Amino acid sequence: MSLSPGFDVVHELTASSSGAEVFEHGWQSFSPTTAYPLGTRPHRPTSERNRMLNYRQASHPGREGYFSEGVLAVADGSGAVHVVAAADPFTTGVRLQAVADPGGSVVVGADGPVAVTVVPGSSVQEALRSWAVGAVEGAGLAPARPAPTAWCSWYEYWGDVRETDVVENLGAMRTLDLPIDVVQIDDGYSAEIGDWLTPSSTFTDLRGLVEKIRGEGRRAGIWLAPFFAGARSRLADEHPDWLLRHPHGGLLHAGNNWNQDLYSLDLSHPGAAEWMSSVFSTFAEWGIDYFKIDFIAAGAIPGSRYSGVDPVTAYRDGLRLIRSAVGPSAHILGCGAPVLPSVGLVDSIRVSADTGHTLEPGDGDMCSPSQQAAVLSADGRQFMNGVFFANDPDCLIVGPKVENRETWAAHVEKVGGAVVSSDRLLGLDDWGLETTRRLLTR
């Protein structure tokens, strides 16, 4: 097997017949990230829809060999870990491949400039953490900030959440005396994907709800998918010139979810940038200072942009615009986020696929919602926690209906990053409430 066209050999090594493994890093939060024993086939998307929504759209990794985004590591089985990373890992989108022959020769290729570090006497996670610390220092970035504790509406109410549901849980936090800093309203409060300031029928007074949350002495948080515009939205209907296009013309399809086609908002367009800034600044003026920005890999897909900048630059510029609108003290949680290009621009980041009430993914894809998929990539990205940002393993869900809840709670605790409860608090049994209280208490 040989490297794909466009990939140049950047490193070669010999691996032992036992103990060697290859670490693949996925492009975005939901992309599988883990180390594989050399010779083991890696996880790949099971459908084109999954690839579009959960992997890098410009990447098409094959079933053979190993494919990584930004950083790849090989433990040679003889006591050393070879870390091959983009020379500028945060502002570029370098891809890497590793192929091996039966004799143990491993060839690593890349489609851009890289730096190679060989770390003796180390595990893969230890070597990657050493690399991460050096990368942050080299970029002159500030230390990562811890994440506040939070409650999120998603895993109990999904997109059917009502204003009254949030109010009920707000009261439960007081009654149960739970140490929750942030009350975060997830998907379901807006009329459409993209029409963030237009309320759904179940949220008649979103600003008043924010005032209730703050009146309880807690911070208010909100969910948005800022780089998406749903086909049903007024945003897409009234401003098609703000949407990403194919180089040959026509709107660029960014995926399908919420039973509609999705388009990517081109924030390099002055009109789109002004509008998006006004959305975030409006929420900030209401008193919201915690922003869960989701599916944001849509901001880094290839396409024809107004400014002509490359996708990674456009994505990072979009995050800077959001930060400018919400202020330096607000907490930004990136989800569905290009992981390495987000470093220095978000405070916490989802490091895995969504969790779920069940152990295994229904479609067998390790980017799909399930505890198994969430644990896989959170373990693979543990070296990032407290270095690049606070790792978010996804929400703490421990209600009686959650399969394998004891093991899932232990995983959230082990990650040691963000802790976000997402149960109906009054529906917790004694074990669920005690576990929630314990993990929220720092």
Image (cartoon, grey):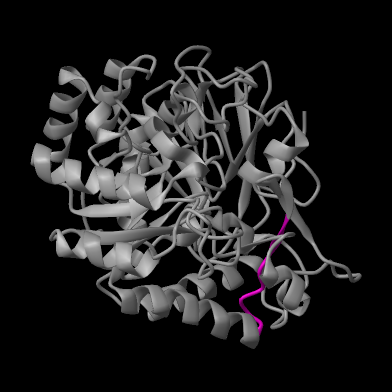
With 393 as the anchor, is 438 left or right in this view?
left
Q: Nearer the viewer, residue 176 or 305?
A: 176
- Residue at the (27%, 27%) spot, across then down: 427
Q: In the rendered view, tell whether residue 415 sits above or below residue 215.
A: above
Examine the structure image and report whether residue 265 is included in the region drawn in magenta.
yes
Viewer can see residue 422: yes
User: Considering the image in quadrants, where does the C terminus appear?
Assistant: top left
Please provide the residue range marked out in magenta: 262-269
Q: Nearer the viewer, residue 189 or 261?
A: 189
With 233 as the anchor, is 390 left or right in this view?
left
Q: Please state the horizontal and vertical placement of residue 222, each as a whole percent of the image.
A: 39, 59
Examine the structure image and report whether residue 425 is included in the region drawn in magenta.
no
- Residue at the (37%, 44%) spot, across then down: 153
- Residue at the (77%, 52%) spot, across then down: 6
- Residue at the (58%, 56%) spot, across then down: 297
Q: Please state the horizontal and vertical placement of residue 359, each as a whole percent of the image.
A: 46, 17
Q: Main secondary structure of the magenta part?
A: loop
Q: Nearer the viewer, residue 301 or 16?
A: 301
Viewer can see residue 418: no
